[in-house]
Image (cartoon, grey):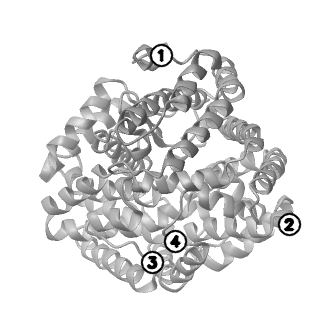
Amino acid sequence: MFASLPTNVFDFMDWTWGRIEPYYLDLTGRPLKQGNISTWLSDWSRLGELLYETYQRLWLATTIDTQDEIARKRFSLFLDEVYPLAQASDQKLKEKLLAIGLEPDGFEIPLRNMRAEAEIYREANLPLLAQEMKLNTEYDLIVSLQTFQLDGKEYTLEQLRSLYRDPDRQKRQRAWQLASERQLADRETINDLWTRFMEVRGQIAANAGLSDFRAYRWLKLLRFDYTPQDCKRFHQAIQTAAVPAAQRLYERRRRKLGLKTLRPWDLSVEPDGQPALRPFENASELEAEVAGVFNRLDPDLGAYFEIMRRESLLDLENRKGKSPSGFCTDFPVVRRPFILMNSVGIHEDVQTLLHESGHAFHVFESAHLPYLQQLQVGMEFGEVASMGMELLGQPYLSIEKGGFYSPNELARAQIEFLESTICFWPYMAVVDAFQHWVYENHQAASDPVNCDAAWEELWDRYMIGVDWTGLEDEKITGWQRKSHIHQDPFYYIEYGLAQLGALQVWRNALKDEASAVASYRKALSLGGTVSIPKLYDAAGIKFAFDENTLQDAIDLAESMIEELETEDV
């Protein structure tokens, strides 16, 4: 009967559960043995791909236009009437496969993942998980409507990023404070949403018979290669190695700007008084410029990006009502990625597109794997794909290699990137440590006032070098403005670990670029068929939490900044 399944997801997206269920019943009822397991898995994958892509496309529509009521209702209907029933049916198939004790080729890691998913599955959680997803869309709607007027023009918060680079300090401060006032206007709304998130998540963990929501998420995120204690060890390494390095960078910036103290609106402006990099005027130019980077770096990667341009798989320009995020998602039926971001004409947008394209290349490189379950990759490595591409692509932004930056401009861009990398680690530690505190203290953290206090304590510990005097409310509510905390709990340590991996990829490329790119692509092609440490090994790098590895990466970044400073004249 699987011959009757649509090959086009658009022919499937409006199917009711009544039309979908017979396919699950067929899979559930089929005798399963060594001789037919590959066909059974292929059929399950096809059905799963249609459902997953339906979910992705319906959700994506709510982010492209957060005010599209039809899109929101359509996604909500899917979450209510199809998604939980499909989850329940998938659970039966996982149990069926696990019960027979067979291990198809390349399926060791997917089976391990299934065991964890089966362990935490509870039918009572299906409506709660759907409710959590709806709360996510509420958060998106709140932040997407945060616009304000400045000099007679309406700005989104994303568009403000360019104003923060204005050499006029008063203009930067005015823009920053107007944005903060607008965000603080939603403080109570987000606080109310937070209490609902916490209630739902507490019940999900309780239903699963786990001690807290962190234990639930650890299994949900399929974290088998490290523990919460490893995360705390990484936090300590950051405090010892990265915090002092970030302080040195902040102090150097303060001196260059000639300021008594460095304020939050002083962190994006060019410290040497040069005009901000403006590499493109619109999204079409951005696409063309970055396409050239990939074609010069590796023709196959360039071909992948051209497919995305040709098939309208890029939505890059900022606009009102669009979710203010940047991400790459995937459509497994057609084995294609889709990138959404909010470009406003600054260098950071170039880096964002390089980053998200790394995720997209991961989709292309692993598309040969036969089963949907083999495409599930831990973001501890998934973010190496993206952050590694930010570094691999940088040299090809230079005019000397066919790009659009002069040597001076490229040096400035690279310095900015390396400085932001070092300064990111302390911020990452704040976000991750905050989430550990939240779910270790679920009842206390359900009160937003306590969250403000915990965030402030962590901020003062890790984020040293910027003066927040008189901006106490803005500082303590920073957790409200980090979407991962609300929408993707515990999804943030991945960035810190992967940034450490990406710098190792870069170190390899400085020695032998062709070999480093080949190893990078080989690791991407493995999808989720091996463990995280083995994916790092395949890329020629080390999966690490220790201070020595972090210090080595910081030393490399600082030495390169010093070298680039001589070119930035």
Q: Is residue 86 left or right of residue 135?
A: left
Among numbered discs 4 and 1, the one appearing first in the sequence? 1
Q: Amino acid at mark 2?
A: Ala
Check whether the beta carbons of the residues at disc 4 and disc 3 lie within 8 A of each other. Answer: no
The alpha-carbon separation of the residues under discs 4 and 3 comes to 36 Å
Which residue is at a point 18% across and 41% down the rendered structure image? 300
Residue at mark 4 to residue at mark 1: CA–CA distance = 40 Å
* Residue annotated with mark 1: 10
Q: Of label 2 and label 1, which has the lower sequence position? A: 1
Q: Give the percent coordinates (x, y) of residue 413.
A: 33, 58
Q: Residues within 10 Å of mark 4 (few under 14, many from 20)?
A: few
* Contact, mark 4 vs mark 2 (Cβ under 8 Å): no
Is 498 situated above or below 556? above
Instruction: Name the front one of labels 4 and 3.
Output: 4
Is residue 151 in view? Answer: no
Residue 390: x %, y % from top left:
33, 55
Q: Which residue is mark 3?
A: 252
Residue linked to disc 2 = 444
How far apart are the alpha carbons under marks 4 and 2? 27 Å
At a point 15% along the width and 42% down the height, the residue shown is: 299
Spatial CA distance of label 3 from label 2 is 39 Å
> What whole-number distance in Å separates the C-alpha atoms at marks 2 and 1?
45 Å
The type of residue carrying mark 3 is Arg
The mark nearer the N terminus, 4 or 3, is 4
Mark 3 or 2, closer to the camera: 2
